[in-house]
Amino acid sequence: MDPGVRDALLTAYADGSWGRYHGHHCDQLTQQLAESHHIEYVWLCASGTVAVEVALRGLGIGDGDEVVLAAYDFPGNFRAIEAVGARPVLVDIDRETWCLDVQAVEAGVGERTRAILVSHLHGGLASMSELRELADRHGVAIVEDACQAPGARVDGRIAGTWGDVGVLSFGGSKLLTAGRGGAIVTNRQDVYQRAKIFCERGNDAFPLSELQAAVLLPQLEKLPDRNRVRAENVSRLLAQCGGWSWLQPLGVPDSGQQASYYKLAWKVFQGAGSPCTREEFLRVIQAEGVAIDAGFRGFGKRSARRCRQVGDLVNSKLAAEDTVLLHHPVLLEPFAVIDQLAQAISKVVDSF
Ligand SMILES: Cc1ncc(COP(=O)(O)O)c(C=O)c1O
């Protein structure tokens, strides 16, 4: 419950801006995203999913091009690459961060590669300085998907701004939410221009509405504080949830980084000696009232007709089978609730 959102809704109703094509809310959001990201250009759009496609189109990627991405990622990212006519190249993820493995990317970049699509997933942060160096060395672009990590800092720089173009989501479950919505952020004028031309069809074809922008503004202001509270609560939770052989949290970013926890990832090891399958664990933990779900399905089983696969993708396949995700709302609760959550998880673990 955010009184800032309620006030924004009431004000938009009273001043009529809720029903207008254009107004000051989208302009203000564009400006504040640019300022908070220290970036030149922002283009608001209808979702993170379409923003990834707009980012690729902004880079001029199309037929015959290849785009490298993780074999464990948001499903729409694979489709966005196909939507622009390019071919996805699947590479493995890092065992610790669940994000792109830099050496695997190095092996995946080929003659036709035009871009690397990097997502920060589940509270983990991709190794952006290494990926930036690699991309520059090969003369390829980076699309940095920060849909799960708004306001996170990677080596001091805000997630989304390491890429030639960054992507944000304001979807219904996100840390900044308007039910739907997204944006690209970039310092490249050519990318911004191409994105704009793609979206402008006499009218904006994939717009963010004035009302959506109005409810995002008060949330954007609070994002740094909320990210700090979520990170503190993750530390407190994990301090009480350790030492289990078959349920382990994803390695959290070290103290030099600032994660933003849209989801908190855990791995349920399902090999020999494990007391339960992921599905059994999910059934019991959900019955306990804890908002934990399965992770992405990954692309490890995609046909070779649709993509090029590099290596055995072993970590991505494990991530697809083993990941469970704690959803973020509880991470803004007081310590007492976090302690209750830790007890609930411990109780379920002990029950197996
Ligand atoms: C990593 C990642 N990229 C892109 C998206 C797409 O965002 P949207 O739901 O706004 O389309 C999501 C949504 O969950 C996501 O997790």
Image (cartoon, grey):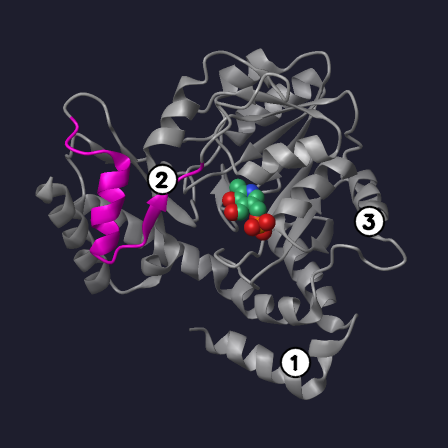
Q: Position of residue 141 (x, y in %)?
A: 69, 28
CA separation in Å, label 1 and label 2: 40 Å
Instruction: Please state if 300 lies on the left or on the right of 193 as rendered.
Output: left
Tell me which segment is drawn in magenta.
274-296
- The quarter of the displayed image where residue 88 is located: top right
The numbered disc on residue 12 is 1
CA separation in Å, label 1 and label 3: 26 Å
Q: Position of residue 251 (x, y in %)?
A: 32, 34
Residue occupying the point 40% across, 31% down:
320
CA separation in Å, label 3 and label 2: 38 Å
What's the amino acid at mark 1?
Answer: Ala
Q: Quadrant of the C terminus?
A: top left
Residue 259 shows in the view: yes
The numbered disc on residue 339 is none
Say which residue label 3 marks: 196
First reached walking from the N terminus: tag 1 or tag 3: 1
User: Residue reaching furthest bottom?
Assistant: 14
What element does badge 3 sit on? Answer: helix
Residue occupying the point 26% across, 52% down:
286
Marks 3/2 in contact by CB < 8 Å: the verdict is no
The numbered disc on residue 255 is 2
User: Residue reaching furthest right?
Assistant: 202
